[in-house]
Every structure is written in C-alpha cells, then in structure tokens.
Image (cartoon, coloured by chain):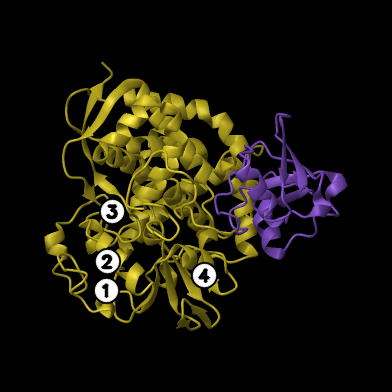
C-alpha cells in the first residue's frame, strides 16, 4: 500500500491509502478527495487534476512529458512543482507522497 | 443567425436531408454538414446511425466538399489531443474560408503561437479572476430576471440568454455598456451564413467586421495609454505576445472572444430551460435540492453541446478507426455525437441533473484548445439557475423553440416561455 496526503488550498488534509496501481488522480477521485475534477478522465488533456508536489517528493515523481508540460503551461496557476495527478503513477516508492491542490482547477 | 428560415424552403436545397429517413439512405449519402437537419431538429437519428454503423465516416460530396465525420467519444478525444496529426490551421470551421475573409485567431493556430497568444488572455477567465466577477454577474442576472413579466408569454432567448451574455461580455472587455448590443450584432454577423437574414453577402460581413475593428481599435488606443488593467483589451494591448499583433489578428482574437463568450453560453442558458421543461421529473428534483445546480450545469452543457463540432485538418497520413486519413483531409469531430456515445456515457439520451461524472463530456473539447472560458460559462449558468430558483416555481416553455440554421452553432433563436412565481 502507498499512503498519499492531499492538502487542500485551505489546509484541510486528506490521507488515502491505496494499492500501488493507477494514478494519483484516480487515488484521489476514488477516495472522494475534493479539489480534483479530472474532467478528461485521466488522459492528460484537460489539466483539471493539477497538483503541487511537495518539494521533498519532486525527484521521485519523475519528469513531465511534453504533453503534460503543454497542458500545464496553459494554467495561470502554474508553479515549478506543478504536475497533473493523472500522470503520476502510484508506486511503493511514493508511499508518503504529499501533494497540495490549487484553489481552483482551470 | 438570429433569423430563421422556414425549413421547408431550405429543404429544397439539393444538399438538405430534412424530411428524409436516415435509415433509408445509403451511408455515403449522409451529410451532417448541411444546416437543414440541425435547424429542423432531425439530426439525432443521423448521428446515431453513423455512430453505430460507420463511426469514422467519409462524406465524398457535400456543399462544403469532402470531409470525414468522427462520431465516437474516444476517437474524438484522440483527434482533439493529437495536434501533431490533426492541425487547427487554417480554420476550425467546416467551410474552407477565402483567405481575404479569414481572421487569424488562436483557436485556429497550432503551438507554439497558439499557446503564446492564449496565455495572454486566459487570465481574465481564470477562476481566481472569476471569483471577483461573481457578485457582478449575480447582480446583473438578478436585475434581468426581476424585469421579466410574470404569467405572460415572452421570448427567453432575447430577454434573458442574449441580455445576460452580452452584459457579461461588456464587463469582460470593459466595453461601453450603452453600446453593448453591438457585441451581439458582431457575434451574429461573424458566424452567419449569407442569405439567411443576418447578412446577404460576404462583403456585408466584411463591412460589419471593419466597423468592429474600428471600434475595438479605439478601445485599444485608449487602453494602451493607460496602466495595464484586468479587462481583455488591456491584456491584449499590453501582453508581450499580442501587443504587436497585426490589425487582422487583433480582430480575429476579438471575434473569437465575442463568439466564444456569446453564442455558446447563450444557447446553454436557453437549452437548460428547454431540457427541464421536457423533463418535469428533473425539474422537481431541482426544486427539492438546489445543491444539484453545479452538477446540472455540466449536464446542461453536455445535453445542449452548444458547438456541434470542431474541425481539424490532417497534417500526416494516419489511421483512424480503421480508415486511412490522408494529409490535407478535413476531419470533423462531432461533439454533438460523442456526447451521446453509449460506450462512454451511461443512458446518454437522458437528461439527468444528478448524473455521475457529469463533467466528463466533450462540449469544451480536450487538449490544448480546450475551451478557455469553460469556468466562466459554468459560473454564469450556475448563477442564473440559482437566481431563477429563488424567484420562480417554473420557467414553462409554451411553444416550439426556433432553432438556428447552422451545423456549427447549436442553439435557439426563439424560446417562448411563461414564468410561474414561487407560491
């Protein structure tokens, strides 16, 4: 199992424990974590599962694909640690991952 | 576009399929591009037949030349998210426009220029900015609703849908409020088919567009000499990627923002009234639980699909659903069909305000060209419904709606209603 902590914009915390399969977006949606819309269903084409990855975990979540980069570049809330949660695969190595959701999904 | 032509007259066009049985035609006789069946509200069985029998369909002969129709949700998603295969240039409309009548705008550009120009203006419709607009929208929506007659018939399109979206546009542009109806006019002219009442010729369209450009050039010159503001014109005038754009490109982007912010939301506001009127059980559900409004808004946008399609042009040979698409082929993504695809959407023919995964629809498109104003549109619809429910027991549709003569803009030119107050 991998434990992921989602912190909302207002500070509310949601810890979910999921098996190491699927994406961080799916982990959030299946557990009813608010703040992640995932309109496109996980195909990196709407940017409504935008999260900020805790700095300590940035290296472990891997690199952005060109498509993910392109989608994120259109967001006005883009930061250096921005990722699309649908593009982060849940693995045992990510046990303890911390991400923050933005105030709005665009 | 606001003018309606008798479908019976239009059906005399050799291309019209109005009155024909979709299952009696040969597959290659089916042509979704002609506006006839859309205006006559006969398009649904045509979409269904192609979805079931020929989901990537080639129409060899039509008034707009040969084109592919992409009917299924997943195929549409693939086309929309593959700009390296399917370009948005030179146009996203089904008609190949003459170069002299083309206004370049970022909707019909590929990366990187698209991304650079879009980035300049999207801040105005970003959720953080919208939060500041919410009280203005609510106040204006309330003002419009309070001015409506109770218990007597009037046209919802003109009195509410057009008025609200036009006021909103004027706010976003910081456009002189007393001149706001010019925006509606330019929007209608920009997308009208010549000879259908709004304009008679392309030249006439051009005259109106020149008037539009002159007006907006005046606003540009005024804003460029001021500190950068939060309205769209100021953003364009001061934005690094847009401040040196040629006049035609400025016009193109202005038209894009006017049409994008006008027709689409206008028709979804009207569409919601019609959908609830046709589904009284859903209207009752809404009365019992107003917290369903945000979810209902997504369902309205799916049900209405205010833009029936977007066009792409193949820039590589590729396979799509087993069909060979060649470089230069016109590819039409029929969002209006994908939104009814049984393989992805449960009971797609039904209007369900509490539908699970209601946000999972194609109306905004997906990928880099996903509707920039989607959150603004949702907010306008949410507020208008919140304010309607505070005031009225029912917005009753009392006659047949008149639909627009277009296979692109899917909407209404007239919707007769009677208001019933809360008892």
Please indicate, yes or no, whether residue B97 appears anywhere in the rendered image: no
Percent across and percent down for residue B10 are: 16, 64
Instruction: Please name the residue shown 58% across and 53% down the image.
Output: A46
Instruction: Please name the residue shown 58% across and 66% down the image.
Output: B110
Label 2, label 4: how far apart the Cα atoms are: 28 Å
Helix, strand or loop at label 1? It is: loop
Percent across and percent down for residue A29 are: 61, 44
Residue B105 is left or right of residue B1, and the answer is: right
Tint applied to chain A in the drawing: purple
The residue that disc 1 covers is: B30
The residue that disc 2 covers is: B46
Helix, strand or loop at label 2? It is: helix
The residue that disc 4 covers is: B89
Label 2, label 3: how far apart the Cα atoms are: 23 Å
Q: Earlier in the sequence, mark 2 or mark 1?
A: 1
Category of crowding for the residue at label 2, using alpha-carbon neighbours closer than 10 angstroms: few (below 14), some (14–19), many (at least 20): many
Q: Earlier in the sequence, mark 3 or mark 1?
A: 3
- Closer to the camera in the image, B380 or A33: A33
Label 2, label 1: how far apart the Cα atoms are: 7 Å
The residue that disc 3 covers is: B1
- Closer to the camera in the image, A46 or B198: A46
Q: Tag 1, which chain? A: B
Q: Are marks 2 and 1 in contact (CB under 8 Å)?
A: yes
Label 1, label 4: how far apart the Cα atoms are: 26 Å
């Amino acid at each position: 199992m991998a434990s992921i902590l989602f912190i909302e914009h207002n500070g509310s915390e949601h810890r979910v424990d999921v098996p190491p399969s699927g994406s961080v977006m799916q982990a959030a949606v299946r557990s009813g974590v608010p703040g992640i819309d995932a309109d496109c269903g996980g195909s990196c084409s709407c940017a409504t599962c935008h999260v900020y990855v805790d700095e300590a975990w940035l290296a472990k979540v891997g690199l952005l694909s060109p498509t993910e980069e392109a989608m994120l570049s259109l967001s006005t809330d883009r930061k250096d640690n921005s990722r699309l949660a649908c593009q982060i695969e849940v693995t045992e190595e990510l046990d303890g991952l911390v991400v923050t959701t933005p105030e709005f999904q665009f | 576009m606001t003018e309606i032509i008798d479908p019976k007259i239009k059906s005399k066009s050799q291309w019209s399929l109005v009155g024909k049985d979709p299952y009696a035609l040969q597959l290659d006789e089916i042509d979704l591009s002609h506006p006839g069946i859309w205006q006559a509200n006969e398009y649904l069985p045509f979409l269904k037949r192609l979805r079931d029998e020929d989901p990537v369909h080639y129409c060899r002969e039509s008034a707009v030349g040969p084109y592919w129709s992409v009917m299924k949700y997943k195929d549409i998603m693939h086309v929309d998210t593959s700009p390296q295969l399917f370009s948005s240039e030179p146009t996203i409309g089904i008609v190949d426009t003459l170069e002299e009548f083309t206004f370049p705008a970022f909707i019909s550009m590929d990366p990187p220029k698209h991304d650079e120009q879009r980035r300049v203006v999207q801040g105005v419709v970003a959720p953080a900015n919208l939060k500041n607009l919410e009280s203005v929208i609510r106040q204006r929506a309330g003002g419009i609703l309070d001015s409506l007659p109770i218990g007597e018939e009037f046209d919802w399109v003109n009195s509410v849908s057009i008025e609200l979206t036009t006021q909103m546009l004027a706010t976003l542009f910081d456009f002189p409020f007393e001149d706001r109806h010019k925006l509606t006019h330019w929007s209608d002219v920009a997308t009208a088919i010549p000879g259908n009442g709004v304009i008679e010729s392309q030249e006439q369209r051009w005259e109106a567009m020149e008037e539009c450009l002159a007006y907006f050039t005046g606003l540009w010159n005024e804003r460029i000499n001021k500190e950068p503001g939060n309205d769209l014109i100021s953003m364009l005038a001061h934005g690094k990627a847009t401040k040196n754009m040629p006049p035609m490109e400025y016009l193109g982007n202005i038209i894009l923002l006017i049409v994008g912010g006008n027709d689409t939301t206008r028709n979804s506001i009207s569409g919601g009234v019609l959908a609830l009127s046709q589904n009284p059980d859903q209207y009752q559900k809404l009365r019992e639980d107003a917290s369903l409004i945000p979810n209902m808004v997504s369902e309205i946008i799916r049900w209405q699909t205010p833009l029936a399609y977007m066009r792409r042009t193949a820039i590589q040979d590729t396979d799509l659903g087993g069909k060979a698409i060649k470089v230069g082929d016109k590819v039409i993504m029929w969002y209006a069909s994908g939104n009814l695809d049984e393989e992805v959407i449960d009971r797609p023919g039904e209007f369900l305000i509490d539908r699970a995964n209601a946000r999972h629809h194609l109306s905004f498109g997906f990928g880099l060209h996903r509707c920039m104003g989607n959150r603004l549109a949702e907010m306008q619809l949410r507020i208008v419904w919140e304010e309607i429910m505070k005031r009225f027991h029912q917005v009753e549709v009392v006659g047949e709606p008149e639909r627009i003569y277009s296979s692109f803009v899917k909407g209404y030119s007239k919707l007769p209603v009677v208001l019933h107050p809360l008892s």
